[in-house]
Amino acid sequence: MAQFDLSNRGTFGSKFGIIAAAAGSAIGLGNIWRFPYITGQNGGAAFLIVYLFFVFAIGIPVMLSEFVIGRATQRNPFGAFRKLAPGKPWWLVGVLGIGAAFMILAFYGAVGGWTIEYLIQSIGNTFKGKDAAELQIMFNSFLSDPVRPVIWQLLFMAITALIVLSGVEKGIERFAKVLMPVLLVIIIILDIRSVTLPGAREGLEFLFKPDFSKINASVIFEALGQAFFSLSIGMGTLITYGSYIHKKDNLANTAVIVSLADTFIAILAGIAIFPAVFAFNIAPAVEEGLVFVTLPTIFQQLPGGYFFMLLFFVLLIIAALTSSISVLEVVVAFSVEELKIPRKKATLLATAAISVLGVMCALSWGGLSEFKILGTHFFGLLNSTSTKIFLPLGGLLIVLFVGWGYGKSKVKNELSNQGDLRSRLFKLFMFLVRFIAPIAIALVFLNGLGILKF
Ligand code: TRP
């Protein structure tokens, strides 16, 4: 059937298109919602340094490895490994990825729902005149509401499914290209307002002046998970996106640009948040609520704040969608190509199944707050297991495959577009992929799980 003809796969229309789409996947709630509160919980600048090290030593090599596998095979992660290593169990990486996609999209959709709630509250201007403590109460009472988090989560998932249904070029690429630069501008405006608040200095020191005594196994483990999550790696998302990249595009440049852009946006989000956290005495206990308490506070201090806040939440929702579609796409591409389910049906089934888990996440502070596994509610469980265990494990296997399993000359061929490009840094890449990345991931992993102690 033509529908399943692999030569019929979509591709990204232009070089800027693929960078925009991959950056659209990477840049999302991971940068603006997750990065600030994880950084806050893990000691600020010391965490940031470990994080940056992981982005460069592990993140970029894993991302590039995913692109190589995806473009070489033109398949979903599961099919890609079966094609490159027939008869060997590497396809398990694909299975792991599907599992991670379910977990990530479940809690991601819940947070996507929170952004919809906050857009609606912004329209009604209900934040007006409230101080940080009152905004915190407002956030908590929303989270424990039995209905609203669920409705918005389902709406967010429905929009994600609609975009995925409209296909690669029309849906994903068109979306990603136009709006991300506008989001960048608003974040920079927020940064300027935040760093000029009285008392901002302490926040900047928290973010940039490291206290190395704060580094421990759990900080390092969190930094690795955050790096994987923020870069969209370790799950096969970028294998899937890599399969849509043109044979003539430069994979290495794309990986570096996307990683830098992602890291830059996370740091800009940190610069918006931490000065304000110190200036307004925002309690560290807000955790997952950090940006939802801090940002409305800053917007109130900004001329035209009402307008900017509206625009900000619209764009945040869009940034979240360009990421959520990339997670759903992994499950859909797998179902279409491997299970031979028509695209429309696959999208609907995957969305429905993930939404069931998602509702449980959305209710983790409400109806299901008493439901705990290993001492954490469902949201927390999926959030930390997927980022700290599934993604690094997937990443480890991906670099091992590219470093040792696939064959050096094939890797070189793909990276150089069959010899068309000079690949000056190829040796460095192979060294990172063979030694540094796998050893670092394994050590952080064993140390973080308490199996090995340093
Ligand atoms: N990186 C995205 C963010 O920061 C989330 C995301 C999209 C993701 N696709 C992924 C995370 C694949 C891990 C794997 O919001």
Image (cartoon, grey):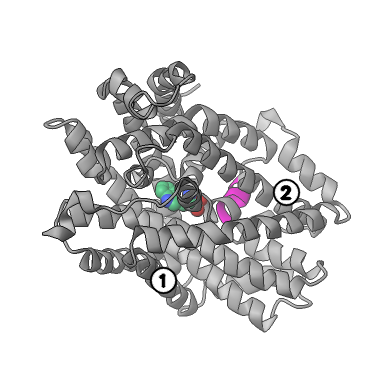
Reading the image, the residue beneath label 1 is 159
Residue 115, x across and y down, in percent: 55, 68
- Spatial CA span between label 2 and label 1: 30 Å
Residue 413 located within the stretch drawn in magenta: no
User: Is 299 situated above or below 417?
Assistant: below
Reading the image, the residue beneath label 2 is 271
Q: Is residue 141 visible?
A: no
Secondary structure category for the residue under label 1: helix
Tell which residue pokes out farthest to the bottom in this image.
124
Judging depth in this view, the residue of 123 and 144 nearest the camera is 123
Secondary structure category for the residue under label 2: helix
Where on the picture, by quarter, is residue 78? top left
Under mark 2, the amino acid is Ile
- Label 2 packing within 10 angstroms: few (<14), some (14-19), many (20+): many
Segment colored magenta: 33-38
Q: Is residue 265 visible?
A: yes
Please give left or right for residue 288 compared with residue 134 in the image. Answer: left
Judging depth in this view, the residue of 301 and 278 nearest the camera is 301
Please give left or right for residue 85 compared with residue 152 in the image. Answer: left
Residue 92, x across and y down, in percent: 22, 39
User: Is 121 situated above or below 375?
Assistant: below
Judging depth in this view, the residue of 47 and 105 nearest the camera is 105
Q: Residue at x 39, y 69 (%)?
A: 157
Mark 2 or mark 1: whose residue is earlier in sequence? 1
Residue 34 located within the stretch drawn in magenta: yes
Residue 264, x across and y down, in percent: 63, 43
